[in-house]
Amino acid sequence: MTKIARAPRTNARIVPLRRGTTIEMVRLVCPDAAQATRIAESFGLPVLDSDAIRDLHQRLISETADALGEGVNERAMQIHLQRIVGSYVGSAHGAGQFYSRAVTEAREATAKLANDTRDEDLDGPVGFESAAQRKREFAAEVAVQAHALRMAAEGAAAAYEHVVGESWKPFERQPEQPGETVSRKAAEVQMAAFG
């Protein structure tokens, strides 16, 4: 019996480059002020003061940076604020995605109500809400939450721009090139100098 030669296994780990969540992505999935107000009024929920939420978070981050100013150099401040704003943006984006799923479920449940031959989707007994109504109300609550988190993220991003002097962008790790070591890179630069 002959043995089949197998290639040796390599333990190289490939880390996929994951795009960071941007403030624009948050704006795409979270309701804006007008939509959040319409939803809140339609479902009897509190109407949020969007500008106040945004301004409060902008002040909060700016005052934090001022308090840290003497003890933290510019680069460290930029890294620190990068992480803080990133957490706000990530939280708002997650809430926006959850909101999108809740709206989809509410639409599906409401569309099922239009089908007269389905008994399980009919309104509940008098005094009780239907499953579709509960899903719509849940989606409305989630919409207001997603909007509030969007405003917090926008305020944090505005503070970053004010403190650092440039627009906030998500941190993206540079992909590592296997076999690219410092000495190899240095050798390439030195050899390039010879022409």
Image: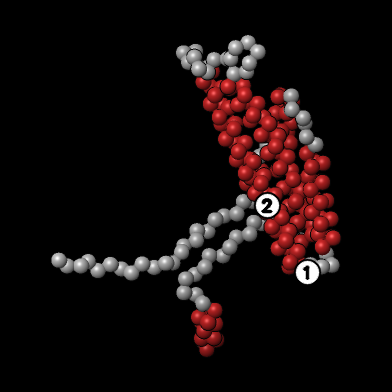
The percent position of residue 157, horizontal first and vertical second, equals 73, 52
Q: Residue furthest top?
A: 126
Q: Residue at x 58, y 14 (%)?
A: 124
Q: Which residue is pictured at 73% across the width and 66% down the height?
A: 76
From the image, which quarter does the N terminus lie in? bottom left
Label 2 crowding class (10 Å Cα cut-off): few <14, some 14-19, many 20+? some
Q: Amino acid at mark 2?
A: Ser
Provide residue 86's location: percent of width, then percent of height: 67, 54
What is the C-alpha distance between the residues marked 1 and 2? 21 Å
Q: 4 or 143, which is in the foreground? A: 4
Q: Look at the image and name its color scheme.
A: secondary structure
- Residue pointed to by mark 2: 87
Left or right of 30, for residue 12 = left
Q: Horizontal and vertical percent for residue 189?
A: 54, 82
Residue under pointer 1: 73
The local crowd at label 1, few if under 14, some if 14 to 19, many if 20 or more residues have their Cα within 10 Å, is few
- CB atoms at circles 1 and 2 under 8 Å apart? no
Q: Earlier in the sequence, mark 1 or mark 2?
A: 1
